[in-house]
Image (cartoon, rainbow, N blue to C red):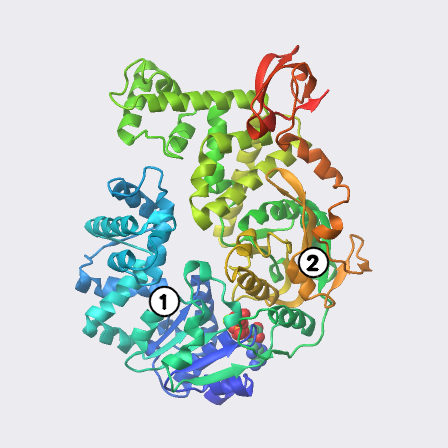
């Protein structure tokens, strides 16, 4: 294909941008306007028309997947595409540091630490830093370090700047941890993820010859999704482009969705200040979405106060109406989606791979997966491990396993340090030796740590742990699966651990909520104990494993894609379902209390909507299970903003009038039947009186002998003719008046 042919496949403005030869340029435009396409064509045009060597071109994308796709698309347009340098910021950093890291003291063969390795070092160094208490969470510290790095702050910068506390940690102490962490890491010839950018920046600043050499390999630089760059990435780009100044960046401020990771929308807004001679190309036509989908996107984003006004006109026809459906609950929502997928597949001949389900949080995927599985729709989940493979789920299930089987040493080793209980590796080894010598379980060794003088110091700790496990064993006897798991989560100290982990802990907590929900639903459908539930959970996860394995074989798979809206950035699908358009999910709970939070959530919804090419479905649930309890949910405020531009359909597919479902209107109504059924196990603070007759789901009728404590801690002693006398926490025991 000759060069002029290439530009003929673009509209006039796109073609101008693709024909941009030297100097800085900014392509700023709404979703689906062909920014990425223009960027790829520009690269092809540089080579085909201006005679630039593929080996002089760099293109930075947001994900490895996007880089691979870009390379694939470029290879159709030009020869020698394999010589193009296309990568993410992080993999570019690895490549540069592998080649030149020795100049700044990195030894050959340095290793890259992942998140868990980072935590290991932090745990090692934090203990001896004044001002860091034993209950300071290393994840909080990791968050502080990561943020400092994305803002290019050294330990010294961190100790100097701002408030006395950073994320609840004394600033000076945080800086000291940072300092020691860096020293330790260096001693081990390792770098972490953040270093991939910051060390490259330092290398460029300290060794101009290296910068020059890399610049020869990157005479023409492209950055896609520029709106989501952070300070460190910005600086890296600036240094790289400082000699030849051939920098073309592409982005959409309305799609900036990574502020929580340090992305700074100002980078794109200030581009013209940084490069006064920058050429700006505004693309105004959307080629991706039907006119109806685009109207919704435009209407929505207009509500953001802080934005650059842009035009985005549809090239495509009206197309199918956008559909909104409010299901009775989250499961009905999943079933609605599954039903439509089946319908589109069988009646319209749509491939499953043309359809995507997008959600706000990974925790939402479980119910959707189940709905799809029931009707045998193949699905693949992008980003996010299978539900039962998640660490927090595995941990809590390990507690449960140990509670019902005290000889499960593997489970014990998994959880004895989560949360930290002051039982170190040396102690654990001694306990293991004793257990082996005496032919007992590790838990028995813990229980005997003091009496049998297994440990010289700190023997009380394993004894406490054994007592905790005994309480859990009782709970496994006395409570139904869902309340039992909640008991485990709370009494193990796991919840407190997560509470300190910020954003990440929040996500893990949501997943644990989902686990409780799963147990609750399981109990509604099965007769059985927690042990049976654990078996089923294990089977489910091994099915997941098999599925991943078949996927990895590279078999051509026609599957529906499930992912978060964050992960969907830059992608497109003919059919898109956005589920959970409810207050508290989209916008998320966290966004409500954060400055600019709602606007960021609106941008995220905008990203979601603009992934759709032909059909868009929005769904919400009237009742959503959270904390094992079904709560009435309110429609997302964003629905009101686009009202009048979608068809609301009822479960029979009939178009009905949209009426916003808000607390005001719905508070007095009777809860849905499932809500009534599910509330009892979680009834907090339900008052029982001595002498009262009560009913327990397992032990049958009994009589309250004594009551102690109030609220969440209320405990009753009940005599059951069938099972003897039991002490039960009211909150978990699922007692009802007999
Ligand atoms: P996002 O903001 O979501 O990253 P984008 O601006 O990068 O979107 P692209 O992904 O490049 O948009 O393009 C969106 C869709 O429109 C793609 O399928 C692309 O091939 C198509 N497209 C873009 N420009 C044209 C054009 N001039 N002619 C035909 N199709 C086009
Ligand atoms: Mg794009």
Q: Nearer the viewer, residue 322 or 640?
A: 640
Number of numbered discs on residues: 2
Query: Where 360 sits versus 255, above or below?
Result: above
Q: Nearer the viewer, residue 603 or 718?
A: 718
Percent x, y of residue 644 = 74, 67
Percent x, y of residue 695 = 69, 20
Mark 1: secondary structure: helix
Query: Where 721 sits versus 193, above or below?
Result: above
Percent x, y of residue 402 = 46, 25
In the picture, the quarter occupied by the C terminus is top right
Q: Which residue is mark 1?
A: 231
Percent x, y of residue 332 = 71, 47
Q: Residue 345: which disc?
A: 2
Mark 2: secondary structure: helix
Query: Where 406 sits versus 364, above or below?
Result: above
Left or right of 186: which side holds 314? right
The residue at the point 35 percent across, 41 percent down is 136
Query: Where 138 sits versus 267, above or below?
Result: above
Whether residue 314 is visible, yes or no, is: yes
Confirm or reject: label 1 Cβ below 8 Å from ligand 1: no
The residue at the point 27 percent across, 67 percent down is 201
In front: mark 2 or mark 1? 1
């Amino acid at each position: 294909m000759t060069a002029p042919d290439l530009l003929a496949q673009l509209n006039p403005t796109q073609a101008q941008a693709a024909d941009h030869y030297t100097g800085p340029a900014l392509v700023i435009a709404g979703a689906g306007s062909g920014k990425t396409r223009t960027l790829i064509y520009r690269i092809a045009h540089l080579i085909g028309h201006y005679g630039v060597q593929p080996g002089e071109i760099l293109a930075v994308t947001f994900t490895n997947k996007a880089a691979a796709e870009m390379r694939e698309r470029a290879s159709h347009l030009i020869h020698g595409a394999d010589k193009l340098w296309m990568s993410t910021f992080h993999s570019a950093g690895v490549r540069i540091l592998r080649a030149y890291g020795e100049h700044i003291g990195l030894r050959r063969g340095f290793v890259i630490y992942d998140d868990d390795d980072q935590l290991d070092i932090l745990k090692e160094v934090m203990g001896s830093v004044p001002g860091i208490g034993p209950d300071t969470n290393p994840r909080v510290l990791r968050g502080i370090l990561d943020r400092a790095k994305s803002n290019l702050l050294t330990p010294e910068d961190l100790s100097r700047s701002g408030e006395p506390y950073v994320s609840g940690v004394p600033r000076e102490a945080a800086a000291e941890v940072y300092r020691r962490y860096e020293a330790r890491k260096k001693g081990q010839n390792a770098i972490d993820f953040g270093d991939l950018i910051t060390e490259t920046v330092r290398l460029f600043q300290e060794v101009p010859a290296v910068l020059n050499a890399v610049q020869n390999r990157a005479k023409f630089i492209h950055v896609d999704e520029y709106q989501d760059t952070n300070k460190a990435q910005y600086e890296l780009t600036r240094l790289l482009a400082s000699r030849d100044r051939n920098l073309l960046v592409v982005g959409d401020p309305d799609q900036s969705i990574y502020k929580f990771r340090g992305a700074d929308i100002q980078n794109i807004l200030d581009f013209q200040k940084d490069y006064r001679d920058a050429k700006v190309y505004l693309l105004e036509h959307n080629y991706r979405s039907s006119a109806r989908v685009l109207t919704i996107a435009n209407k929505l984003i207009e509500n953001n106060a802080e934005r650059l006004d842009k035009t985005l006109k549809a090239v495509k026809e009206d197309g199918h109406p956008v559909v909104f459906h409010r299901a009775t609950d989250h499961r009905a929502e999943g079933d609605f989606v599954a039903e439509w997928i089946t319908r589109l597949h069988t009646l319209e001949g749509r491939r499953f791979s043309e359809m995507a389900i997008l959600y706000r949080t990974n925790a939402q995927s479980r119910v959707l997966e189940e709905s799809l599985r029931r009707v045998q729709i193949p699905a693949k989940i992008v980003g996010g491990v299978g539900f039962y493979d998640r660490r927090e789920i595995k941990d809590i299930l390990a507690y449960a396993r140990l509670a019902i089987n005290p000889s499960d040493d593997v489970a014990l080793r998994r959880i004895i340090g989560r949360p930290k209980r002051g039982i170190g590796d040396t102690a654990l080894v001694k306990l293991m030796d004793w257990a082996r010598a005496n032919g007992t379980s590790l838990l028995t060794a813990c229980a005997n740590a003091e009496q049998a003088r297994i440990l010289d110091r700190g023997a009380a700790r394993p004894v406490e742990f054994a007592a905790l496990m005994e309480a859990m064993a009782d709970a496994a006897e006395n409570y139904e699966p869902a309340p039992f798991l909640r008991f485990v989560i709370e009494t193990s100290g796991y919840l407190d651990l997560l509470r300190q982990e910020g954003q990440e802990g929040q996500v893990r907590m949501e997943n644990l909520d989902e686990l409780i929900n799963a147990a609750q639903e399981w109990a509604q459908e099965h007769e059985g104990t927690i042990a049976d539930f654990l078996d089923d959970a294990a089977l489910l996860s091994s099915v997941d494993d098999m599925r991943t394995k078949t996927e990895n074989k590279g078999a051509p798979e026609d599957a529906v894609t499930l992912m978060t809206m964050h992960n969907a950035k830059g992608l497109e699908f003919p059919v898109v379902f956005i589920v959970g358009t409810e207050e508290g999910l989209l916008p998320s709970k966290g966004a409500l209390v954060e400055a600019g939070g709602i606007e960021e959530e609106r941008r995220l919804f905008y990203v979601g909507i603009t992934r759709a090419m032909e059909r868009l479905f929005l769904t919400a649930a009237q009742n959503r299970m959270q904390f094992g309890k079904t709560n009435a949910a309110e429609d997302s405020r964003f629905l009101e903003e686009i009202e009048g531009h979608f068809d609301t359909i009822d479960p029979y597919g009939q178009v009905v009038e949209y009426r916003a479902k808000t607390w005001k209107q719905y508070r007095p109504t009777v809860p849905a039947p499932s809500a009534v059924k599910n509330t009892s196990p979680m009834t907090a603070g339900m008052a029982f009186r001595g002498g009262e007759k009560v009913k327990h789901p397992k032990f049958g009728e009994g009589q309250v002998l004594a009551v102690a404590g109030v609220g969440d801690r209320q405990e009753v002693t009940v005599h059951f003719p069938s099972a003897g006398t039991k002490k039960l926490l009211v909150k978990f025991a699922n007692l009802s008046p007999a």
